[in-house]
Amino acid sequence: GAVVSQHPSWVICKSGTSVKIECRSLDFQATTMFWYRQFPKQSLMLMATSNEGSKATYEQGVEKDKFLINHASLTLSTLTVTSAHPEDSSFYICSARTPPHDYGYTFGSGTRLTVV
Amino acid sequence: GQNIDQPTEMTATEGAIVQINCTYQTSGFNGLFWYQQHAGEAPTFLSYNVLDGLEEKGGFSSFLSRSKGYSYLLLKELPMKDSASYLCVSMDSNYQLIWGAGTKLIIKP
C-alpha cells in the first residue's frame, strides 16, 4: 500500500532555532500534502495544504512566515518551524491523498517536537 | 458551521462489543471516515462510508445515515490492543477533512 515516510520521529530543539520536518511519498506521487498539528488530548488541526510547485494555503490563524512549507517535488514536502518557541511543542503529522481515489489519505508517522 | 460530535471517553471490557457514535454537520458531504489513533502515533485508517448503510470488515463495522448526519463504529470482541482513540472524520464538498476530537476507548480486562 501507499506509504508516507515522515522524519524525524521526534526532535528536541532550543527556543529560537528552526526545525525542518520532511514527508516523502514512497510509492506514489503526492500532488497535495496536508500538514496537521495535534496538541495533547485534542483533535488534529489542519495547518496548511501544499500543492506541488505552488504556494501553500494556510488555515486561518497559522503564521505562514513561521511555518514554512515547501513542496518542490511530487514526492517531498517539508515543514520548517522557524524561531521555535515552547508553545510550538506539538505533534506534527503530514498526510497525502492516496491515488487512485481522491478520498484516500495516507498519514506519515508524525513528529513529536519539543522546544526547550 | 462545520462540526463533529463524539463522546470524549468510553470504557469497555475485553472481548465485549462497543459502539462509538458520531454526529456531523458539514458544508456538503463526500463521505465519513473512522480512524484509530494510539497515543503518540499517527492515525490509521479504519473505514470509509459515503452511502447509507452498514459496512462490515472483520472485527468492526461502520454505519452511516446521511439524512441524520450520523455514523457509528462498532467494535467487536475487543482485544486489549484496541485501547486507543477513535476519530470520526467527515469530508466536505471541497474534499477537506473535518476532524472530531476523538473518543478515547479504555478497555479493561
Image (cartoon, helix red, strand yellow):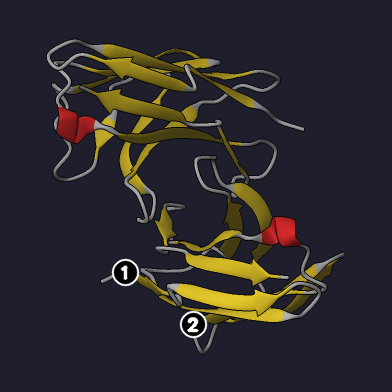
The kind of residue on which mark 1 rests is Gln
Q: Position of residue A105 (x, y in %)?
A: 58, 42
Residue drawn at (13%, 21%) of the image: A65
Q: Which residue is mark 1?
A: B2
* Earlier residue among tags 1 and 2: 1
Locate residue B1, reporting x and y percent.
25, 71
**Which residue is labeled 2 in the image?**
B69
Res. B77 visible in picture: yes
- Name the residue located 42 percent from the left edge and 69 percent from the top edge: B28
Q: Residue furthest bottom?
A: B68
Amino acid marked by disc 2: Gly
The answer to which of A58 and A92 lies nearer the viewer is A92
| Structural distance between the alpha carbons of marks 1 and 2 | 12 Å
Identified at 67% across, 71% down, the residue is B108
For mark 2, give the secondary structure.
loop
Secondary structure beneath dot 1 equals: loop
